[in-house]
């Protein structure tokens, strides 16, 4: 049992559900589907992570399943929903389905054919793209959206590479990852408030 990891994952879980019900749930179906592909995948992965760190070994596979879902379907959906967010246009429902389908094909490659390089490639491309979209939002005078997207990406990157950025911190690197990811979800939620309805 690793209590500190369970606590930090529980905080990430609660943050994810808060963001979903406070900001995402009220959006149009298309935008909701794209946002929730990332937000809820991270949240459910964290929820089963709590069980895993409390000693339930069966929860590890479920948590990993949703981590891969967040890194493929969620990451692709995040890029495109951010793009429409900055454009200040509603997301076409057919477009949401196509993006989701592409994400699930990538997810299948990772899970069925054990192609972890697909997961890594999507994450390597998607996160910088969301950052660029956020910066683009700043130039388009969509400052609130741009700032929240940029802050969300910075939190994700700092969490992912926290051993490099904050090597001497008193907080364990896994816990720090969970806390920074929770901050990232909050920032994405604040950005999603500005999504244009169809």
Image (tube, rainbow, N blue to C red):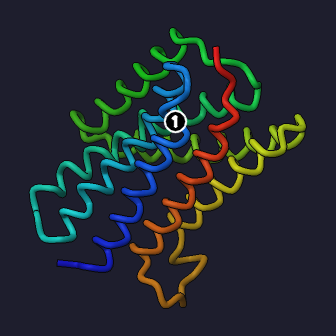
- Whether residue 139 is situated above or below residue 166 in the rendered picture: above
Percent position (x, y) of residue 161?
A: 53, 68
Quadrant of image for the C terminus: top right
Percent position (x, y) of residue 168?
A: 54, 90
Percent position (x, y) of residue 102?
A: 43, 22
Circle 1: element type: helix
> Depth check: 165 or 134 in front?
134
- Whether residue 88 is situated above or below residue 122 in the rendered picture: above
| Quadrant of residue 117 within the rendered picture | top left
Q: How many marks?
A: 1
Q: Residue at x 31, y 74 (%)?
A: 5
Left or right: 62 with respect to 92? left
- Mark 1, other Cα within 10 Å: few <14 / some 14–19 / many ≥20: many
Left or right: 177 with respect to 193? left
> Depth check: 63 or 185 in front?
185
Q: Which residue is mark 1?
A: 24
Percent position (x, y) of residue 105?
A: 35, 24
- Whether residue 77 is situated above or below residue 95 in the rendered picture: below
> Depth check: 194 or 122 in front?
194
- Whether residue 141 is situated above or below residue 45 in the rendered picture: above
Left or right: 94 with respect to 70? right
Q: Residue at x 84, y 44 (%)?
A: 143
Quadrant of image for the N terminus: bottom left
Left or right: 54 with respect to 161? left
Q: Residue at x 60, y 34 (%)?
A: 79
């Amino acid at each position: 049992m690793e209590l500190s990891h369970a606590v930090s994952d529980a905080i990430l879980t609660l943050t994810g559900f808060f963001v979903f019900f406070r900001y995402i749930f009220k959006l149009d179906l298309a935008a909701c589907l794209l946002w929730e592909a990332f937000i809820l995948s991270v949240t459910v992965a964290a929820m089963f992570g709590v069980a895993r760190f409390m000693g339930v070994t069966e929860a590890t596979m479920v948590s990993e399943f949703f981590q891969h879902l967040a890194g493929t379907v969620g990451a692709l959906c995040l890029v495109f929903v951010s793009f429409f967010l900055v454009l200040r246009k509603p997301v076409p429902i057919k477009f949401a389905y196509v993006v989701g389908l592409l994400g699930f094909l990538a997810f299948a490659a990772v899970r069925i054919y054990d192609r972890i390089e697909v997961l890594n490639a999507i994450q390597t491309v998607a996160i910088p793209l969301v950052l660029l979209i956020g910066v683009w939002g700043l130039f388009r005078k969509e400052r609130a959206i741009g700032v929240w997207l940029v802050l969300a990406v910075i939190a994700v990157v700092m969490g992912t590479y926290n051993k490099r950025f904050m090597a001497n911190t008193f907080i364990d690197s896994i816990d720090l990852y969970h806390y920074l990811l929770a901050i990232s979800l909050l920032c994405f939620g604040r950005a999603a408030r500005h999504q244009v309805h169809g």
